[in-house]
Image (tube, grey):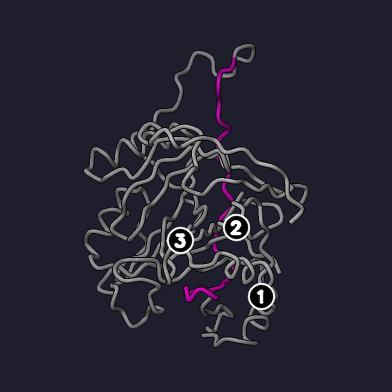
């Protein structure tokens, strides 16, 4: 099977008006809106959908209040859909659609769906950075961003009672790969052999039920991370942490508190892995997640790592 990445994420929210305002400021394109809620899209077509939290069309929530209700994974073709459906139907109910897509729940109770990916191939203009000894941008100013326009959905993060249960489901049943991990605490999983550093990250928390942490969106470069963050700040939205740069995944980031529940993240320049990559293990917890940032305590340090055969 070939799972490309996250194709859509659906939220149940308490205030549709507030969620719509936030997603518009976030830079997503509105596709359709109405009493049902609203659908938004990144540049590549990956989607964010919002519905009233009490909508009967939604899967059961993993927590109270506004939160993620379903993650839809994009696959390459109908054969992939058939293989995944046959695998998962052995021990759980599937809700099938005429186009072959379907939805169910994973082993932490989160709604998940699968469809042929609607992502479009992006063909951005090459970025131009002047480096001592290599002047590539001459007689022209650098690009400045008044706001961010998310190109694609990157990854989702959840706190869970036991990350090993989630890892077993996504690895054993769906073929995800562990890129990096925190020993006995958390794992970064990617859906494709050649792809994003992680599409889902799960970490142990002291709770009996899962909790949505954040959803990340890729933008073009660190300057767009900054431009987007400044625009949201001017619009009155509150920073959670950032701007900064992750040690694991290398991405530059800026997180904002979201009326969708949890947070949304702008990120840029994430690592891309292949099967040649060797999983690393880190001794520290996932809260120590950044090389540098402007508004975190001194405990945010780059952790040391060693390779792992697992």
The residue wearing badge 2 is: 184
Q: Which residue is mark 3?
A: 205
Which label's residue is closer to the chain start, 2 or 3?
Answer: 2
Q: Residue 166, percent across and down?
A: 57, 68
Report the span colored magenta: 107-131
Q: Nearer the viewer, residue 169 or 34?
A: 169
Q: Nearer the viewer, residue 167 or 88?
A: 167
User: Is residue 113 depicted above or below 142 in this figure?
Assistant: below
**Given this view, does label 1 or label 3 mark the residue nearer the observer?**
3
x 47%, y 73%: residue: 110
Write the residue at 55% across / 45% down.
284
Q: Are marks 2 and 3 in contact (CB under 8 Å)?
A: no
Q: Is residue 120 magenta?
A: yes
Residue 78, disc: 1
Name the secondary structure under disc 1.
Answer: helix
- Circle 2 packing at 10 Å, graded few (<14), some (14-19), many (20+), is some
Q: Position of residue 132 (x, y in %)?
A: 60, 12
Where the N terminus falls, by quadrant? bottom right
Q: Secondary structure at mark 3?
A: loop
- Please say if the residues under marks 1 and 2 sit with CB atoms less than 8 Å apart: no
Q: CA distance from mark 1 to mark 2?
A: 37 Å
Q: Are marks 1 and 3 in contact (CB under 8 Å)?
A: no
229 within the magenta span: no
Tag 2 or tag 1, which sits nearer the N-term? Answer: 1
Mark 1 crowd level (few <14, some 14–19, many ≥20, 10 Å Cα): some
């Amino acid at each position: 099977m070939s799972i490309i990445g996250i194709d859509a994420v659906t939220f149940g929210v308490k205030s549709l008006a507030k969620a719509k305002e936030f997603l518009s400021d976030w830079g997503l394109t509105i596709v359709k809106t109405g009493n049902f809620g609203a659908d938004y899209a990144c540049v590549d077509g990956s989607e964010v959908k919002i519905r009233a939290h009490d909508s009967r069309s939604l899967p059961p929530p993993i927590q109270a209040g506004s939160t993620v209700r379903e993650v839809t994974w994009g696959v390459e073709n109908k054969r992939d859909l058939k293989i995944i459906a046959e695998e998962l139907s052995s021990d759980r109910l599937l809700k099938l659609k005429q186009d072959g897509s379907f939805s169910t729940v994973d082993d932490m109770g989160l709604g998940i769906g699968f469809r042929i990916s609607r992502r479009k191939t992006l063909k951005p203009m090459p970025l131009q950075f002047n480096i001592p000894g290599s002047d590539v941008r001459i007689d022209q100013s650098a690009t400045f961003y008044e706001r961010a326009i998310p190109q694609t959905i990157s990854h989702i993060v959840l706190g869970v009672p036991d990350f090993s249960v989630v890892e077993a489901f996504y690895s054993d049943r769906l073929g995800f790969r562990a890129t990096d991990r925190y020993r006995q605490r958390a794992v970064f999983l990617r859906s494709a052999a050649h792809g994003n550093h992680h599409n889902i990250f799960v970490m142990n928390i002291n709770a009996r039920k899962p909790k949505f942490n954040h959803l990340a969106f890729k933008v073009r470069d660190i300057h767009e991370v900054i431009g987007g963050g400044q625009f949201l700040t001017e619009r009155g939205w509150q920073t959670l942490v950032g701007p900064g740069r992750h040690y694991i995944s290398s991405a530059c980031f800026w997180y904002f508190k979201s009326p969708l529940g949890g947070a949304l993240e702008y990120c840029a320049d994430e690592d891309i892995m292949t099967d040649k990559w060797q999983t690393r293990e880190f001794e520290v917890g996932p809260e120590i997640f950044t090389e540098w940032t402007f508004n975190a305590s001194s405990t945010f340090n780059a952790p040391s790592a060693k390779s792992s055969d697992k």
